[in-house]
Amino acid sequence: SRKIAQERRTFSMQRVPWKFLTVHGCRRFRGSVSTKKWHCDGWQEKIHGRDLVYFGERHEQPAILDAQVAMLEYWSKTVGTPALVLEIFTKDQQFILDRWKSEAFVVLQQLYLDSGGDFELSHYMPLLDAATAAGVRLVAGFPSREAARRIIQDPASEEVSKMARLHQELGPAIEDHFRLFAALIAGASAPEEGPLPQRGRRIFPAQCWKDLECAKVVAALLPSHSSMVVAGCG
């Protein structure tokens, strides 16, 4: 079916450092990364022609940024109409991406900071430049923190109800997701079992909603664009 075919073409990168990279269908290949370099044998074959590639990053690490540029430049040549979806830009910052390369970087960087940008934009300049040069559409992927806060503060909202239904469908897997999320906040390894951590419980629903909104952005793009999504791991 069309759904199965699309799923088979989905490529999902797990957190970095990469213990493994997972391709839908349980095929895996190993890779490694350090602060100085990255290495992953066979990645060209795994992402070639894929409609959807997720790159889970540790923000602003030089080796990770190099990997993103290399993969984007290769992958964008193997698909029809590529788009790059970025977590570091919120939807109300789309205007900055629309003006990329048409205005001076210092101007865009200031606009980014003035509109609540959380990251050092210069670190992502090579990726954005490479995407623009390759004709890749730039798309802001996430809602703002303020939007997430408003949604979560209303427990009766349709968005919160929708998220609760998705969590029910995930079942025990949602606990694993939270363990990972809490470990990232604490800077520790995620335990596979035991009591659930207390830290992170208040902000976890907001992060889940932001991830859900990003998924909607990607889903809306897929009928017309192959998409590479760069988002924080976890």
Image (tube, rainbow, N blue to C red):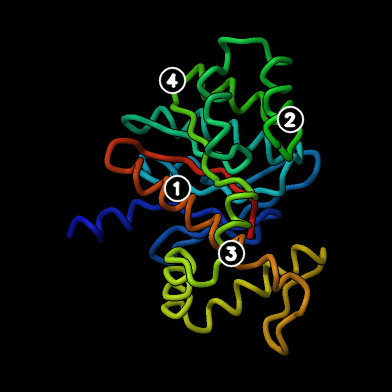
Quarter residue 205 falls in: bottom right
Provide the residue designation for mark 2.
Answer: 113
Q: Identify the element where label 2 is drawn.
A: helix
Please name which of the two marks, 4 or 3, marks the residue nearer to the observer. 3
Q: What's the amino acid at mark 3?
A: Ile
Q: Is residue 203 above or below residue 47?
A: below
In three-dimensional space, the C-alpha distance between marks 4 and 1, rounded to whole angstroms, equals 22 Å
Marks 4 and 1, the one that precedes in the sequence: 1
Name which residue lies at 63% across and 38% down.
Answer: 67
In three-dimensional space, the C-alpha distance between marks 1 and 3, rounded to whole angstroms, equals 37 Å
Provide the residue designation for mark 1.
Answer: 46
Callout 1 touching callout 2 (CB < 8 Å): no
Quarter residue 100 falls in: top right
Name which residue lies at 43% across and 30% down.
Answer: 76
Provide the residue designation for mark 3.
Answer: 152
In three-dimensional space, the C-alpha distance between marks 3 and 2, rounded to whole angstroms, equals 25 Å
From the top left corner, tell me how far across and down residue 195 is, in percent.
Answer: 72, 89
Marks 1 and 2, the one that precedes in the sequence: 1
Q: Is residue 34 above or below residue 99?
A: below
Q: Nearer the viewer, residue 127 or 203?
A: 203
Marks 3 and 2, the one that precedes in the sequence: 2
Q: Identify the element where label 4 is drawn.
A: loop
Q: What's the amino acid at mark 1?
A: Lys
Marks 4 and 3, the one that precedes in the sequence: 4
Answer with left or right where residue 1 lies relative to residue 89.
left
Callout 4 touching callout 2 (CB < 8 Å): no
Name which residue lies at 69% across and 51% down.
Answer: 32
From the top left corner, tell me how far across and down residue 187 is, in percent.
Answer: 82, 63
Q: Identify the element where label 1 is drawn.
A: helix
Q: Is residue 126 above or below residue 12?
A: above
Please name which of the two marks, 4 or 1, marks the residue nearer to the observer. 4
